[in-house]
Image: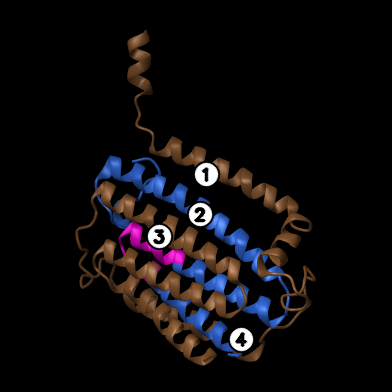
């Protein structure tokens, strides 16, 4: 049963990722991204990361992809892009070479090394009777409290930055009107 | 239980697809989606290591990666909208100056 779930979810994740790269229409690419993200959420559940799977569905598949679709619709780039023309000569073979090299490197790392090294001792994943949310919350609010507070600052900066970037430049005309 | 190395191999495949897509595609939005694919593959790796080492720390790291990815998407899409307002085109070839 574990293998069945893994094979189906893994195949869906790879198919979604290929769909993002190969689809000509950005809207189709966004929907393929949703498929890949949901399949990875299933793999999270299989590895005892229940809370992260829920967050993955809500934040990634819910919020981020909807944001992508909003921008696609807003600026009207839903016209398809031709994948057959190659703007830079030799770019595709070079990209394929980089891809093969990166995959071979990662694959041999997985085969040769596996999971080694010291544990962070932030808490066990399986022992005891706590739920996954409780296990995740305890180190988050004790050992990792400072990074957690820094993420709140990061989110505020991101919101302010997005507002500043997407603001229309009317300040000049207002100043002229006052002067 | 499926061995962790299979999950790591799957994450390697997903990361490679995202990296090649980032290099090949010209549409800025699709390139951005490929970055999300790569981040997602790394998240899968962290969750797999958390299970293999029986340590919740990997899942805490994924939590932070999710927050940073959300902030990154907000700022990146803001930049894309700002570029579109000036240039009305979507390919990375047209953006060659910091101030257009």
Q: Is residue A10 above or below residue B65?
A: below
Camera-near label (3 vs 2) is 2
Answer left or right for B97 relative to B40: left
> Is residue B30 located in the magenta-colored stretch of the structure?
yes
The tag on residue A158 is 1
Which disc, if any, is residue B32?
A: 3
Residue closer to the observer: B2 or B26: B2
Q: Magenta residues, as a range?
A: B21-36
Relative to A175, is B83 above or below? below
Q: State left or right for residue A5 relative to residue A149.
A: left
Q: Which image quarter: residue A132? A: bottom right
Q: Which residue is mark 2?
A: B70
Identify residue for label 4: B4
Is residue B98 visible from the viewing direction of this image? yes
C-alpha distance separating marks 4 and 1: 35 Å
| Residues marked 2 and 1 touching at CB (< 8 Å) | yes
Query: Could you classify mark 1 by the number of other residues whose Cα lies within 10 Å: few (under 14), some (14-19), or many (20 or more)?
Result: many
Chain letter of the residue beneath label 3 in the structure image: B
Q: Chain A rendered in what hue? A: brown
Query: Residue A145 at x, y = what percent?
Result: 74, 53
Marks 3 and 2, how far apart in space? 12 Å
Q: Which chain is blue?
A: B
> Between disc 2 and disc 4, whose residue precedes?
4
- Does A149 appear above or below A104? above
């Amino acid at each position: 049963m574990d293998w069945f779930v893994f094979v189906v979810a893994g195949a869906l994740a790879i198919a979604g990722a290929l769909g993002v790269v190969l689809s000509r229409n950005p809207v189709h690419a966004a929907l393929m991204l949703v498929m890949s993200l949901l399949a990875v959420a299933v793999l999270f559940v299989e590895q005892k990361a229940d809370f992260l799977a829920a967050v993955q569905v809500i934040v990634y598949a819910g919020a981020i992809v909807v944001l992508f679709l909003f921008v696609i619709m807003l600026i009207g780039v839903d016209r398809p892009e031709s994948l057959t023309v190659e703007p830079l000569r030799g770019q595709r073979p070079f990209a394929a070479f980089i891809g093969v090299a990166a995959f071979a490197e990662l694959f041999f790392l997985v085969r040769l090394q596996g999971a080694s090294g010291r544990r962070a001792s932030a808490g066990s994943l399986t022992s005891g009777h706590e739920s996954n949310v409780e296990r995740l919350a305890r180190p988050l609010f004790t050992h990792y409290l400072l990074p957690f507070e820094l993420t709140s600052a990061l989110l505020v900066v991101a919101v302010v930055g997005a507002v500043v970037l997407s603001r229309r430049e009317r300040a000049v005309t207002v100043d002229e009107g006052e002067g | 239980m499926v061995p962790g190395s299979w999950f790591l191999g799957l994450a390697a495949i997903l990361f490679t697809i995202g990296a090649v897509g980032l290099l090949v595609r010209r549409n800025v939005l699709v390139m951005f989606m490929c970055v999300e694919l790569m981040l997602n593959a790394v998240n899968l790796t962290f969750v797999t290591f958390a299970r293999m080492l029986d340590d919740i720390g990997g899942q805490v790291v994924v939590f932070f990666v999710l927050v940073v990815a959300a902030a990154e998407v907000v700022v990146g899409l803001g930049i894309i909208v700002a570029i579109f307002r000036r240039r009305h085109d979507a390919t990375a070839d047209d953006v060659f100056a910091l101030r257009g």
